[in-house]
Amino acid sequence: MGDKTLTDIAKEMKDIDFVMLQTKTDGGQIAARPMSNNRDVEYDGDSWYFLFEESRTFQDIERDPKVGISLQTNKGLLGKPPTFFAVVGEAEIIRDKAAFAEHWTKDMDRWAKDGIDTPGLAMIKVHAERIHYWDGEHEGEVRV
């Protein structure tokens, strides 16, 4: 069993942009879609993602905020396999434009033509409850 801390995990996750976000649909099925944190990766147990209110992901979260995030590092150190992470937490819907501005990057202009004033724009903040990891030699879980 591993003994990583949240600080250790944050160091490994700092360069990861894309994740797979899992939600529960209205029919009880699991849905997953790629999400980008727009390089907002100073990980402290919270993750931030922009989305639109008309999206299925938004509707799933509004109905049931329990979510999962899966991600992996690009490569392991010294030829070791990458590290895989499974984050379980609760998503909070954010509609505050000041929070949008705090997490905005120019890359978002591609999808949100009016910037933080784009109609229907929202953001979710995923509060991690636990993070399970596998690094090819060890595995463990950190409660946040």
Image (tube, rainbow, N blue to C red):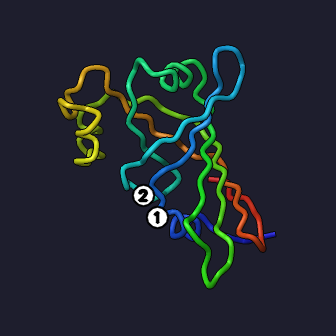
Q: Is residue 69 above or below residue 7?
A: above
Instruction: List the residue tagged with mark 1.
Output: 14
For image coordinates 70% across by 56% down, the residue present is: 132
Element assignment for label 2: loop
For image coordinates 31% across by 20% down, the residue present is: 120
Residue 79: image x %, image y %? 65, 81
Residue 47: image x %, image y %? 47, 47
Q: Residue furthest bottom?
A: 78
Q: Residues within 10 Å of mark 1 (few under 14, many from 20)?
A: some
Residue 93: image x %, image y %? 44, 29
Tag of residue 123: none
Residue 21: image x %, image y %? 57, 39
Location of residue 22 by image quarter = top right
Mark pair 1, 2: CA separation: 5 Å
For image coordinates 58% across by 65% down, the residue present is: 9
Q: Residue furthest right?
A: 1
Amino acid marked by disc 1: Lys
Q: Is residue 49 above or below residue 130?
A: above
Q: Is residue 120 above or below residue 89?
A: above
Marked residue nearer the N-terminal end (1 or 2): 1
Quadrant where the N terminus sits is bottom right
Amino acid marked by disc 2: Val
User: Which residue occupies the foreground of this view, 109 or 8?
Assistant: 109
For image coordinates 52% across by 63% down, the residue present is: 13
Say whether residue 87 is left or right of residue 47: right
Q: Is residue 108 above or below residue 23?
A: below
User: Which residue occupies the foreground of this view, 102 or 29?
Assistant: 29
**Residue contact between numbered discs 1 and 2, judged by CB atoms under 8 Å:** yes
Instruction: List the residue tagged with mark 2.
Output: 41
User: Which residue occupies the foreground of this view, 11 or 111?
Assistant: 111
